[in-house]
């Protein structure tokens, strides 16, 4: 193996469904290396024991090991680097990622196992560095822009690399995901990124200093082509767009939505945005194109706290965006933050009132933590509140700005309020009727309405919602998937089978369709047919849980 690109989450992060995923950036670097002619692959060691990792590295020692480092996994990254050197002293270890970029001085001066650090955007830099190290025997690596390394006992840096101007030029990670180690490809490829850079000035975020403050965008066609490729090869029909602010370019979002509708891609998706970057028209376009949830980073309902965080938004803007999102009929998800220096019980009450007022569908609550590359950390060091070597001296994964009792209590109270508000503000049948009147037909509304009716035991109403999708858009997999699952619950196996068979012809790589067919055959006692379907599902997706469970039941 020439190059292995690896990630090892911290112990806590490995249990989280999101931070345990392989960073998307490694997928882009791998794709860039492959198209440049290198032999490379990615590895997610998050749920591997250290013994398993050692065996993997010893089996096929890479010439270059690239490690993605975040603050939470900084010590695991160092341990992975040391382990690779113990197994193969000639292995070249290259660090990259947000933590490595902003702490390269400390990393290189304290860790002899780290040879190079890629600073910021890594595709071109890593490819050029690999070319110098592997093809040119290490000659000329100093001319590679965007790296840091040790030279004669001192830390040297090359000139910074200009941000990549054309993001469409990057090859899609999905096309080069073969051979991945420890990666649930179907879960991994659900998450896509369509832009880089952030013009915001949030004091707790390092993104602008990593990607740059100038926003760069992929074209709508590029995004839709990636979604279609993943849908056709891997059977995914739900996606999550992980841009910091997906709606920053209004014209681009409308064109993306128009293409999804025009090309009949028929997916559901969610995205992240800022409350001051949406309006009714763009939200209506998104809903018609399959967006069922928008996540806003609102952080707090207190104007004082928002200003302290550098958010440059107001509670009134939050309320307006929430009202527009609910009018469009999408789920409203909030990212909240607490434990801000100076935050009081009155500020907490403002946030609780905001949650009530905007009728949030769900949300996440996080204590404010220090990250390198943020003004929050830089200001803390300058004022003497935070030690300069915090990330090296403190072994905790998350380094909270406050550790008093207020923080833990605030997290619990906010989560409880989110849960209560979500329960009493779910969309009703009347709401869905109003949404259809305002937007016209869109399959996302029918799916959401059908799920509501199912939860209420209104099987006939649910089936009508799903049937409308099948009738209006016979090639839309969501109508058949929901119809099949509904009839399977009702034990109408014949109709369920017909729906899943139709789904399997529309999206042949959709592993759950075959799992469902396997379930039906098993419940009917046709174990031979059930095994065929289960094995088909697992061949498409080795992580398909329903198939594995079904096989265990048959074998049991």
Image: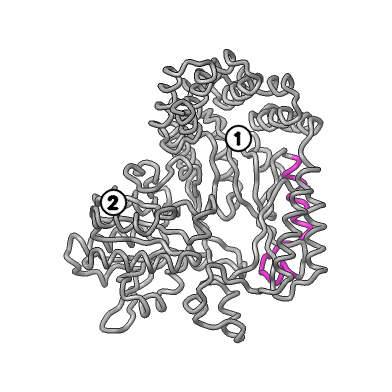
Q: Residues within 10 Å of mark 1 (few under 14, many from 20)?
A: many
The image quarter in which residue 137 lies: bottom left
Q: Residue 5's spot in the image, x, y percent? A: 34, 56
Q: Residue 466's spot in the image, x, y percent? A: 65, 23
Reading the image, the residue beneath label 1 is 289
Compared across the picture, whether 287 is left or right of 165 comes to right
Q: Residue 517, relative to residue 245: is it above or below?
A: above
Give the farthest residue toward the front.
556
Highlighted range, magenta: 305-327
The image quarter in which residue 291 lies: top right
Compared across the picture, whether 501 is left or right of 460 comes to left
Seen at 40% across and 54% down, the residue is: 48
> In this rendering, which labeled residue sits more in front, label 1 or label 2?
2
Q: Foreground residue, 256 or 62?
A: 62
Q: Is residue 526 magenta?
A: no
Reading the image, the residue beneath label 2 is 40
N-term mark: 1 or 2: 2
Q: Residue 185, relative to residue 515: is it above or below?
A: below
Q: Foreground residue, 401 or 10?
A: 10
């Amino acid at each position: 193996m020439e190059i292995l690109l690896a990630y090892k989450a911290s112990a806590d992060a490995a249990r989280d469904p999101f931070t345990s995923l392989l960073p998307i950036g490694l997928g882009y670097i791998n794709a860039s290396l492959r198209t440049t002619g290198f032999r490379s692959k990615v590895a997610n060691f998050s749920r591997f024991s250290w013994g398993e990792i050692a065996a993997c590295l010893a089996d096929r020692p890479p010439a270059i090991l690239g490690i993605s480092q975040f603050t939470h996994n900084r010590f695991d990254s160092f341990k992975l680097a040391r382990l690779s050197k113990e197994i193969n002293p000639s292995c070249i270890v290259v660090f990259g990622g947000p933590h490595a970029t902003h702490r390269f001085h400390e990393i290189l001066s304290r860790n002899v196992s780290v040879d190079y650090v890629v600073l910021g955007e890594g595709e071109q830099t890593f490819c050029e560095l690999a070319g110098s190290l592997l093809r040119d025997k290490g000659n000329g690596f100093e001319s590679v822009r965007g790296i840091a390394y040790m030279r004669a006992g001192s830390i040297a840096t090359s000139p910074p690399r200009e941000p990549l101007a054309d993001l469409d030029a990057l090859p899609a990670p999905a096309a080069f995901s073969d051979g991945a180690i420890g990666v649930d490809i179907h879960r991994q490829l659900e998450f896509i990124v369509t832009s880089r850079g952030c013009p915001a000035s949030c004091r707790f975020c390092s993104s602008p200093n990593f990607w740059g403050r100038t926003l760069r965008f992929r074209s709508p066609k590029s995004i839709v082509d990636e979604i279609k490729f993943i849908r056709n090869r891997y059977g995914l029909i739900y996606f999550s767009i992980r841009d910091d602010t997906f709606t920053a370019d209004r014209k681009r979002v409308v064109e993306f939505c128009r293409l999804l509708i025009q090309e009949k891609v028929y997916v559901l998706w969610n995205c992240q945005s800022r409350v001051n970057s949406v309006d009714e028209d763009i939200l209506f376009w998104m809903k018609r194109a399959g967006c069922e949830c928008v996540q806003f980073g609102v952080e707090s309902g207190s104007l004082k706290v928002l200003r302290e965080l550098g958010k440059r938004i107001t509670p009134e803007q939050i309320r307006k965006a929430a009202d527009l999102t609910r009018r469009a009929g999408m789920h409203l998800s909030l990212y909240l933050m607490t434990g801000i220096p100076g935050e009081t019980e009155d500020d907490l009450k403002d946030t609780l009132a905001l949650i009530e007022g905007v009728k949030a569908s769900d949300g996440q609550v996080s204590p404010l933590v220090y990250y390198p590359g943020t003004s929050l950390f830089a200001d803390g060091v300058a004022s003497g509140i935070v030690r300069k070597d915090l990330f090296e001296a403190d072994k905790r994964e998350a380094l909270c700005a406050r550790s008093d009792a207020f923080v833990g209590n605030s997290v619990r109270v906010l989560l409880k309020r989110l849960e209560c508000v979500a329960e009493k503000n779910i969309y009703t049948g009347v709401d869905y009727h109003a949404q259809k009147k305002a937007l016209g037909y869109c399959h996302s509304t029918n799916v959401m309405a059908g799920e509501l009716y199912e939860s209420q035991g209104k099987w006939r109403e649910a089936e009508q919602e799903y049937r409308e999708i099948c009738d209006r858009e016979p090639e839309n997999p969501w109508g058949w998937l929901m119809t099949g699952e509904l009839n399977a619950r009702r034990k109408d196996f014949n109709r369920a089978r017909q729906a899943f068979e139709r789904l399997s012809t529309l999206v042949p790589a959709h592993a759950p369709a075959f799992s469902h067919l396997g379930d039906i055959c098993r419940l009917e006692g046709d174990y031979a047919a059930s095994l065929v379907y289960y094995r088909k599902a697992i061949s498409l997706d080795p992580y398909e849980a329903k198939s594995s469970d079904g096989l265990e039941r048959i074998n049991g």
